[in-house]
């Protein structure tokens, strides 16, 4: 088969393009020909029934999934935390790049005195909202949507005290504000800081090319976190955090996982250190532990509350 040009699909935000160019450079350095195809992600694309049946659910990923299935691009590059745990039929995980910073950060205005009193924090993430309210129950959390640049602008334009961002996204496009602190107490989203490349399962040329980019340590950690998420969720968005870290000194994995109520008042967590050999079912068993100890009831409550909103 003649060597083809690998068409890299991406959304057209600054962060998405940075991620696509990072993958492009890695492939080019290996001698592969590439081309970037920016796809406008409108979020309101009408999908016909057969594509819905493929299981395309990710608000940030479905546009690129459709482009790949239609043959317009060969691969898609995503922030892994945005990707549904069940990929559409025919699309496979081809590479997980070495992970960046996993923490969340608070970008704030003025000073941090509000942390000791009343304050207003912005985030579009149920996970961040719940954990913030768990730690600061007197605060108010408001919704914040859009790409990183737009969210930063909204923070500047409003009278909020601060907004929560993923450190990795800010660092990748050099957007770290002067006033920010790391929220090392906040459990990140499953796969936060990791970049995922997906491709068609029958495209052997492209799959072989991407296999050179895969970081096995990140692949295992994100597998555990996403297995935890998938086992807990059952198809429902919920405030769930998860982080798996490999310790090479004693060949173990440290896993932290948590499920919160929407208002942050309830917190169910697991914290485990296990031998590396137990990684394949670690996320599943950790999630089952939470589900069996009140988590199933909390998940049902979250689903009902979200339906009412």
Image (cartoon, grey):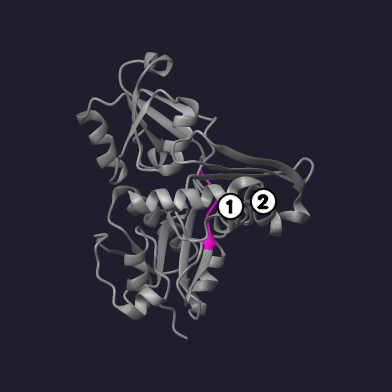
Answer few, some or many: residues within 10 Å of disc 2's Cα (few below 14, many 20 plus, some between 14 and 19): few
The residue at 56%/66% (across/down) is 211
Q: Nearer the viewer, residue 110 or 25?
A: 110
Magenta-drawn stretch, dominant element (helix, strand or loop): loop
Kindly identify which residue carries mark 1. Answer: 296
Q: Is residue 237 above or below residue 154?
A: below
Kindly identify which residue carries mark 2. Answer: 292
Residue 35 visible in rendering: no
User: Which of the 4 image quadrants contains residue 118?
Assistant: top left
The residue at 35%/65% (across/down) is 62
Residue 60 in the image: state x and y as whole percent: 35, 58
Residue 246 in the image: state x and y as whole percent: 68, 45
Give the structural element (helix, strand or loop) at label 1. helix
The answer to the question of whether label 1 and label 2 lie on touching residues, with beta carbons closer than 8 A, is: yes
User: Which of the 4 image quadrants contains residue 141?
Assistant: top left
The single residue placed furthest to the left in the displayed view is 157
Residue 44 visible in rendering: yes
Q: Is residue 113 above or below residue 201?
A: above
Q: Nearer the viewer, residue 136 or 146?
A: 136
Magenta residue check for 255: no
Q: Nearer the viewer, residue 199 or 305?
A: 305
The residue at 30%/48% (across/down) is 14
Answer few, some or many: residues within 10 Å of disc 1's Cα (few below 14, many 20 plus, some between 14 and 19): some
Report the Cα–Cα distance between label 1 and label 2.
7 Å
84 relative position to 231: left or right: left
Which residues, given as a range, are shown in magenta? 95-100
Residue 11 in the image: state x and y as whole percent: 31, 58
């Amino acid at each position: 088969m003649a060597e083809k040009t690998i068409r890299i699909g991406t959304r057209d935000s600054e962060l998405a393009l940075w991620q696509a160019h990072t993958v492009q450079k890695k492939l080019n350095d290996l001698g592969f020909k590439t081309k970037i195809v920016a796809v406008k992600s409108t979020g309101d694309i009408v999908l016909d029934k057969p594509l819905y049946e493929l299981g395309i659910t990710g608000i940030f990923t479905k546009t690129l999934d459709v482009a790949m299935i239609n043959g317009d691009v060969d691969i898609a590059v995503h922030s892994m935390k945005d990707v549904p745990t069940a990929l559409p039929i025919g699309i496979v995980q081809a590479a997980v790049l070495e992970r960046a910073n996993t923490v969340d950060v608070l970008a704030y205005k003025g000073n941090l005195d509000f942390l000791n009193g009343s304050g207003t924090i912005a985030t579009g993430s149920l996970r961040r909202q719940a954990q913030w309210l768990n730690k600061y129950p007197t605060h108010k959390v408001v919704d914040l949507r859009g790409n990183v640049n737009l969210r930063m602008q909204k923070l500047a334009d409003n009278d909020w005290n601060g907004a929560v961002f993923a450190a990795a996204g800010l660092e990748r496009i050099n957007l770290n504000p002067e006033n920010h602190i790391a929220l090392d107490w906040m459990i990140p989203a499953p796969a936060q800081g990791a970049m995922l490349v997906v491709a068609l399962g029958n495209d052997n040329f492209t799959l072989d090319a991407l296999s050179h980019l895969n970081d096995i340590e990140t692949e295992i950690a994100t597998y555990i976190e996403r297995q935890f998420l998938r086992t807990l969720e059952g198809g429902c968005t919920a405030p769930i955090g998860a982080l798996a870290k490999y310790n090479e000194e004693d060949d173990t994995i440290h896993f932290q996982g948590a499920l919160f109520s929407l208002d942050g008042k309830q917190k169910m967590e697991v914290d485990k250190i296990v031998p590396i050999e137990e990684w394949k079912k670690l996320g599943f068993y950790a999630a089952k532990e939470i589900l069996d100890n009140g988590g199933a009831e909390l998940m049902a409550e979250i689903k009902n509350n979200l339906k009412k909103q």
